[in-house]
Image: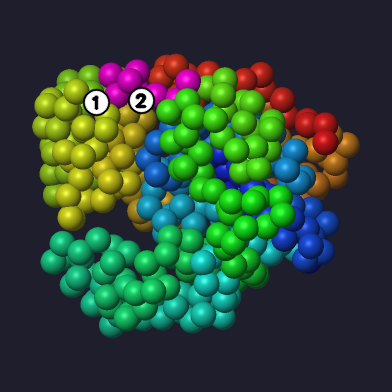
């Protein structure tokens, strides 16, 4: 394996992520390249720290290069999120996609990925969705694979493989079995990023075995709260009519506006808007997509080419890794200007991130390790 690619968010980076980075290197990868979400993440939230800080953490933890997954993919459901990451991975020469999954069985995931492109199975899935079943649950019901498909990283892994198949199998994939079992460096088992974020919001002390000291130090500097974000969101939803926003359907934007009129906090808003038919993640994504005016469609995302990649961090002295990318790379704002249309939505996310009082660190591309 010459180049390992990991699609990630590192929101924040923790011991389980480091295990995956180490696994990629252990497979013989000369370079480990991360395709990472920027200042908005797939859960429909602003990231806990800015993208440059999180990219530096990735490099310090073992990545050689971190490039940005554009916002139009990070603010979509698992299928399009995976597709965006795989499209960029396809631009890396001699690449293998490395990801974690609960089952750890690439053959089983490959089998399910192939099955999900069967027309009859897709008809059964659509029928379940029309009855109000959530998409992941609908797939599980239609396939009878409840145990596998009820686990989030298995589901995402299947979407990675589907994207690889549907883009012509330009890369291969391997998976590492996720585990909660203790290991010498993590005596209490592997944490989740959400548990670390929740601890940070509460001001709780985080066990240093769970995440590197450089991550915890930066996490402590960032005030994690939704007050200013929700103030911007509430004003937008109740003052302007949302039209043609990505993944809006069945008057869902009207539901969000009505909930924003009544809810006094972001948590209350999410609870009021969530229903059996509308998952919490979808509600948060639609709200955030409305704020940044994401007008992409599923078909537009599917056909969108990768014209360039935006570099977030790179090991100092390893500039040669950039030659492994088959499309132009942008190392500066000036270089990105040539691709301003491609970067427009990501730029709006960055401005929202700053407006919501989430601080940016000093932008450092070349990181000493």
Looking at the picture, the colour scheme in use is: rainbow
- In which quadrant will I find the N terminus? bottom right
Q: Is residue 86 magenta?
A: no
Front in this rendered view, residue 306 or 68? 68
Left/right placement of residue 172 relative to residue 197 reads right
The residue where tag 2 is placed is 226
Q: Visible in this render: residue 92?
A: no
Badge 2 vs badge 1, beta-carbon distance below 8 Å: yes
Furthest toward the right, the residue is 317
The reply to whether residue 262 is in sight is yes
For image coordinates 83% across by 57% down, the residue present is 30
In this view, the residue in front, 336 or 292, is 292
Q: Is residue 351 above or below residue 134?
A: above
Mark 1 — residue?
265
What x and y, as percent, mark residue 199?
47, 34
Residue at 51% over, 44% down: 193
Q: What is the CA distance from the residue labelled 2 to the residue labelled 1?
A: 8 Å
Label 1: few (<14), some (14–19) or many (≥20) C-alpha neighbours in 10 Å: some
203 horizontally vs 280: left or right: right
Report the magenta residues as a range: 223-231
Coordinates of residue 70 in the picture (x, y in percent): 51, 41
Please tell me the numbered disc located at residue 75.
Answer: none
Q: Position of residue 43 (x, y in %)?
A: 40, 44
* Rendered residue at 62%/58% (across/down): 182
């Amino acid at each position: 394996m010459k180049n390992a690619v990991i699609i990630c968010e590192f929101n924040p980076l923790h011991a389980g992520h480091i295990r995956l980075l180490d696994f990629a290197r252990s497979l013989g990868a000369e370079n480990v390249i991360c395709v990472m979400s920027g200042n908005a993440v797939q859960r429909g939230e602003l990231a806990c720290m800015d993208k440059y800080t999180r990219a530096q953490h990735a490099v310090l933890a073992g990545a050689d290069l971190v490039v940005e997954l554009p916002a139009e993919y990070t603010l979509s459901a698992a299928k399009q999120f995976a597709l965006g990451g795989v499209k960029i991975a396809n631009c890396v020469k001699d690449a293998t996609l490395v990801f974690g999954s609960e089952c750890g069985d690439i053959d089983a995931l490959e089998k399910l990925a192939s099955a999900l492109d069967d027309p009859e199975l897709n008809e059964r899935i659509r029928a379940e969705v029309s009855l109000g079943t959530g998409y992941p649950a609908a797939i599980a019901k239609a396939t009878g694979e409840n145990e596998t498909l009820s686990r989030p990283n298995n589901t995402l892994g299947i979407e990675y493989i589907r994207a690889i198949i549907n883009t012509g199998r330009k890369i291969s994939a391997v998976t590492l079995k996720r585990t909660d079992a203790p290991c010498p460096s993590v005596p209490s088992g592997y944490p989740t990023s959400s548990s670390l974020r929740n601890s940070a919001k509460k001001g709780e002390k985080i066990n240093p075995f769970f995440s590197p000291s450089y991550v915890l130090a930066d996490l402590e500097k960032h005030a994690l709260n939704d007050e200013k974000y929700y103030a911007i969101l509430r004003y937008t939803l109740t003052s302007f009519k949302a039209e043609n926003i990505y993944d809006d359907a069945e008057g869902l934007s009207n539901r969000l506006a009505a909930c924003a009129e009544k809810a006094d906090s972001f948590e209350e808003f999410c609870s009021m808007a969530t229903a059996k038919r509308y998952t919490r993640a979808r509600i948060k994504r639609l709200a955030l997509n409305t704020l940044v005016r994401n007008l992409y469609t599923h078909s537009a995302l599917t056909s969108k080419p990768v014209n360039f990649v935006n570099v977030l961090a790179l090991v100092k002295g390893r500039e040669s890794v950039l030659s492994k990318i088959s499309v132009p790379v942008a190392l500066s704002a000036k270089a990105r200007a040539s691709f301003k249309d491609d970067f427009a939505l990501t730029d709006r996310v960055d401005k929202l991130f700053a407006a919501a009082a989430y601080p940016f660190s000093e932008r450092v591309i070349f990181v000493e390790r």
